[in-house]
Amino acid sequence: MTTEVTGAGSASSPHPGSSGQAPEQRSRGGRRGDAEQVRRTREVSTGFIVSRIAVLGIVAALLIYALPPLIQTEAWTALGVVGVVTALVAYLYLTPRHIPAKYLVPGTIFLIAFAIVPIVLTFITAFTNFGDGHRGTKDEAIRAIETSSVTQVPGSPEYYLTIAESDGKMVFLLVDPATKAVQAGTADGLSPVAGADVSLTGKVLSAAGYTVIPTAQAAERDAEIAAFSVPTAGGAVKATGLSRAFEGKADKSYDAACDCVTSPSGGRWVADEVEGYFVDAEGKHLDQGWKVDVGFANFAKALTDPTISGHFLNVLIWNFVFALSAVATTFALGMIVALALHSPRVRGTKFYRIMLILPYAMPGFAMLLIWRDMFNTDFGLISKLFGVHDWLGTPTTARLGLIVINLWMGFPYMFLVITGALQAVPRELTDAARIDGASAWAGFRRVTLPLVLVALTPLLISSFGFNFNNFNNIKLVTNGGPYAIDNSTVGATDLLISYTYRVAGFDSGVADFGFAAAISVFIFAIVATVSTVAFWRSRAQEEVYS
Amino acid sequence: MKWLREVGWRYAVVLVVCAFALFPVLFVVSAAINPLGTLGSTGLIPEGASLKNFVDLLTGDHPFTKWFLNSVIIALISAFAGLLISVAAAYAFSRMRFRGRRVGLLSILLIQMFPQFLAIVAIFIVFTEVTELYPTFGFNKPWGLLVLYLGGALGVNTYLMKGYLDTVPKEIDESATMDGASHVQTFFRIILPLVGPVLAVTAMLSFIGTINEFLIANVFLRDTEAKTLAVGMYGMLTDKRDANFGMFAAATLLTAIPTVSLFLWLQKYIVSGLTAGAVKG
């Protein structure tokens, strides 16, 4: 440990030669104290100081950047986490001790923040109904219900409206038609504005602290403007068009006594804490709900809901078929070519090898789209060569097509690793088999193949894991299709991961994050089980303990 | 006849598979130089040759050069930083003995089974918050995508890297330590140069992987200007599938130039780079 400590200081020591010798000479004289002293002086060399100043500088810069937004939004937990982590990291790189941690911490921080935390959050989300209609808390839902029910009633005040921005957030500048007094309306409420320059027509031309958005640009954001509302006592200010606003009354209001939403016209919606909705007597709910825990409902939905479970099982089966045949076909073709080239009597192996790995080097996402268009019914190359057929529009050919495409993309990798493994098989073994009278096939089957398989099992397992979640292949070629007429959420070639992506509503449609997260958890469980069993059965475990 | 049985079949197999490997590439080249530039007019043999598609691509409505830069910057930095992160961790696991080493290795082995993109829903939720707090690292910004990709770096490569480092004899760095080198010096001046070629291959594979990454990038980058090649070019074909095909093929070829040349340059190290961590017999 001590050698490493002193070494840390000498990283850019001006006299590496002499300082390396000095302790040796002195300790030979039996004066251990002197050697200690030399070490201590080396600790404060230039390199040591520079690196420590750099650490402090980076820490300070990080804190200056990270803290203000957290303080502004009063995110105290996050603030605490950032503070503690930064302090620990600063300590770690200032002290000469804990050397292994110095090498492990950078990766670990990223791993925890962007891999482990999302995985944990996925598990948590899987037990909620989080999604469109259930995005926020109950309070947020109540506020949304009240402000969206604001209507203009006779006699409610009207304003001239100017759209502006402050700190990147939208602001309504409201001019009272009678008094010309200017108020600024934000998502938090109204506040007076002093010294604004107002035109004769009631437009605000300029106001200190606000950037007025020109009408042409404001018109492009009309959806945002229409959705914006400024809460006031008993109602809200909303825009009508781009230059007028009114202060309306909320039609619906929340009554804490009965935990329900009521409207003057007699409507009554009672909070349902299980569903996360306000529900009326007939069982109809308001659009805005809130996030609640639903227990295992999302998992149960995948397995028992009649509209989903049948498709879910089909997806699961096809997912396994795809992953297994992807590994099997790429391995087989890779093996055949590797064996073919594994002979000193073949000339030009270098050239063939380059040709064969070309599919691996081409940009995969683009080649998948190219393949998709080669399968195009009317113009595609495949239709020109093999006859017109709706290749990707028929479930069977679409699945076969995907496996062929995957074979094209994946066999060069297998070819490369098998070539490496074949070179590691001792020639004596194959020669001995031949001398013992084994045919070429028997020699391959009994000697070469087992040896190659042992060496490549970890890679085959990870290849299975990769193909089990081969999102690009499905998304870019078939997008999960072809779809049955009565079902637009699950297609014949959907893998679990592409199904998840669609359920989460990233492309379009209603987002059901809770259910999507539940499917992700299923994938986690499957991949973990398959890999654990496979690893356990292979000899890969031995490496861990080496 | 004997030649046919022992060597001839090898050529036959290799030629057939080469044809299978090459015909889509040929199709792309043919589409890229096809002056008509539509899918319907493209065959395996080009009917004419012109650079029209390339000119259209670089001067047209799609900000192809911007996408190209976005992709290359994100992929380069994430390959480099990711490699540094994982090789540092592998150095600790390979050369040092400390409490929690075995647990650490096992958990990395476990975590690498879970691809990051499975947590896409949670990533979306987290980055909705991040975008509010730190716009520089939020949606539509390359830095956000970059730190996100780095989250996967430790899990994916560390185990493989430890495999390479274990093949470097321990005596080498022990003698460096005897000569007064610090752990930092041993790491940067002794270990890294020794495993250099293998690092280059791993960096290249990670570079290509990042260029091809579509799932997270498609959720993350919605502004046209912020897109990477994978997301942008996907949109290009969604817009006008038939008419844009020539431009798309030209874009594919331009994207292939850096990756294919890297591949050819590092060719002889690739096999060891892929297998050194796994193949131990």
Image (spheres, coloured by chain):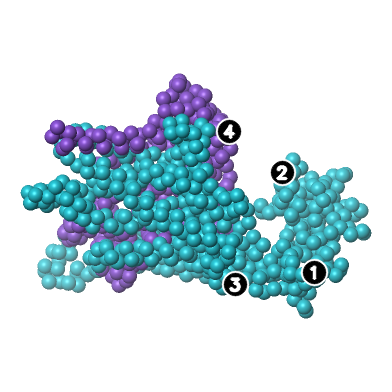
- Residue A26 x/y as whole percent: 15, 66
Residue at 39% x, 64% y is: A528
Q: Residue A293 carries which label?
A: 3
Quadrant the C terminus of chain B occupies? bottom left
Q: Mark 4 — residue? A: B61
Q: Is residue B96 above or below residue B202?
A: below
Q: Mark 2 — residue? A: A220
How far apart are the two marked residues, 1 and 2, measured between alpha carbons?
A: 32 Å
In the image, is A435 to the left or to the right of A67? left
Q: How crowded is mark 1: few (under 14 residues within 10 Å), some or many (20 or more)?
A: many
Q: What residue type is labelled 3?
A: Asp
- Residue A190 x/y as whole percent: 78, 61
How far apart are the two marked residues, 1 and 3, measured between alpha carbons?
A: 25 Å
How far apart are the two marked residues, 3 and 4, measured between alpha carbons?
A: 47 Å
Task: Look at the image and give the colour of chain B.
Answer: purple
How far apart are the two marked residues, 2 and 4, measured between alpha carbons?
A: 20 Å
- Residue B64 x/y as whole percent: 51, 36
Q: What residue type is labelled 2?
A: Glu
Q: Name the mark nearer the viewer: 3 or 2.
A: 3
Q: Is tag 3's residue or tag 2's residue first in the polypeptide sequence?
A: 2
How far apart are the two marked residues, 3 and 2, measured between alpha carbons?
A: 38 Å
Q: What residue type is labelled 4?
A: Asp
Residue A97 at least partly seen: no
Q: Mark 1 — residue? A: A253
Q: Residues within 10 Å of mark 2 (few under 14, many from 20)?
A: few
Query: Which subunit holds the residue at mark 4?
Result: B
Q: Are marks 2 and 4 in one subunit?
A: no
Q: How many labels does the image show?
A: 4
Q: Pick whichever, A475 or A9, lies toward us.
A: A475
Query: Which subunit holds the residue at mark 2?
Result: A
Q: Pick whichever, B56 or A310, lies toward us.
A: A310
Q: Identify the chain drawn in cyan.
A: A
